[in-house]
Image (cartoon, grey):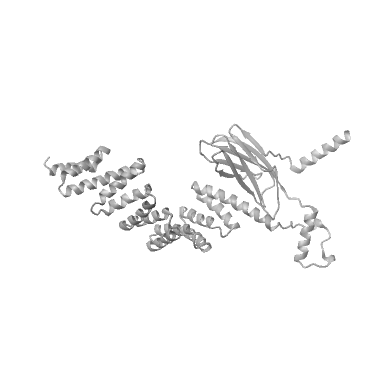
Amino acid sequence: MNLILIAFSLFVISLTLFISDGYSVTESSTDHGSLNIDSDSYEIDSNEQVMVKIFGTINDTSGGARLNIVISPPDGLTDGLHVTVTDNGYFETYWILENDSPLGDYKVLATYESAPIGEVHFSVVEKQFSEEELMSARELLDKKSNQTKTEDVVESVDEIETPPLIELEELSEIEKNKIESYTSQADDYFSHGDYLRSVTYYKKVIELDPENTHALNRLGISHIFLNDDGTALSYLDNAIRVDPLFPKPYYNKGLIYDSQNKFSLAQQNYDKAIELDPENMKYVLGKGLFLYFHNRYTESLTEFEKVLSKEPANIDALFSKSLALSNRDKKYDQFDALIAINHVLDIDPEYPDALHNKKIILNMIGQDYDSEHNFEEAIKYFDQILEIDPKFIDAINNKGATLSRMGL
């Protein structure tokens, strides 16, 4: 009995020495949710990376905020992840252990709207190869160096430092998981306007998959927002090289050339995007706005009408149509503009600038009637403005001028 106790004690001591006083907890929960990882220990070597799966649940997701995860390695350099939570409260993400990650104990802390969700721990150790694996590596080295004579073979497997190659099928799965993880993180940063971080993670994607058009296109857009048009164009051109039928990079190139006042190149790229995806009304609306901002009102109206023929309640197209009509200012344009802006307000009374633009349109109609000496109609339109905004100075002044001409 005493021998058994001694043997067990020695085993515990040896285990303690092996993990260097570390500790591992793969599950944790609070009143707000739960946090889990898929293992309490991960082995790394110089030849591959390892995926750490982090997942769990949030009890109350009514806040709609992102989950924040902080990973604290033993070297003190923390890394943060922002994770989208599903409608039913589940979250899942991956974190990459690089082949040069520090060995030791890691802490993972998750919070949701500042509320603690859980804290878990895991250890990272250097991969230990079995004698069989080392023998396989030795055989591989022998083949590569064309060593056919037995006396040339390394005598001791302990001298072999190169780990065995991963099977292609296994490597493909690892690469796929890493790409998925990097893309998920990049998309999340991108959607929240953190373009510096989105660039970092999209670059990780194309390091593994240089022809990933999604990452190349998003790198282009990210650099647009970072005011680096040259780099943006380079990534977008690369996306087009990989897939000439991919419409998004053409549209984004149009945005860049538009901002550079290269009107011909901008229109060429907008047109190409629409040619490749004619049902995408975002592209058609974008081209219409491009034409509008360059005072090509009649051409812009053609594009807005195309959108409205497919999507009659497209509020952005309706608002843009009202602007184009108001600025073109042909006979009866202001009346059509008024119809369009009223439609906008029917859909969304709070639509930005819609009510203000309606006042301007009414004022222009009133002025047109005044210039035709149709003073009574002019007064009607000025009064409509003052019902909306009694302090609208243009309507006050114009109504006063019209009344004066009427001798009132």
Residue 331 to residue 152: above or below: above
Point out the image quarter for the C terminus. top left
Point out the image quarter for the N terminus. top right
Residue 22 to residue 265: above or below: above
Picture residue at 61% right of the left edge, 36% below the top:
34
**Where residue 339 sits in the image (x, y, percent)?**
29, 46
Residue 273 to residue 126: above or below: below
Q: Which residue lies furthest to the top in this view?
A: 31
Residue 344 in sight: yes
Q: Quadrant of residue 252?
A: bottom left
Picture residue at 46% right of the left edge, 52% below the top:
225
Q: Quadrant of residue 84?
A: top right
Picture residue at 85% right of the left edge, 36% below the top:
6
Left or right position of 321 against 39? left
Picture residue at 65% right of the left edge, 53% below the top:
174
Left or right position of 334 against 86? left
**Where residue 299 sits in the image (x, y, percent)?**
33, 58
- Numbered circles on residues, count: 0
Residue 227 to residue 107: above or below: below
Left or right position of 349 against 384? right
Residue 389 in sight: no
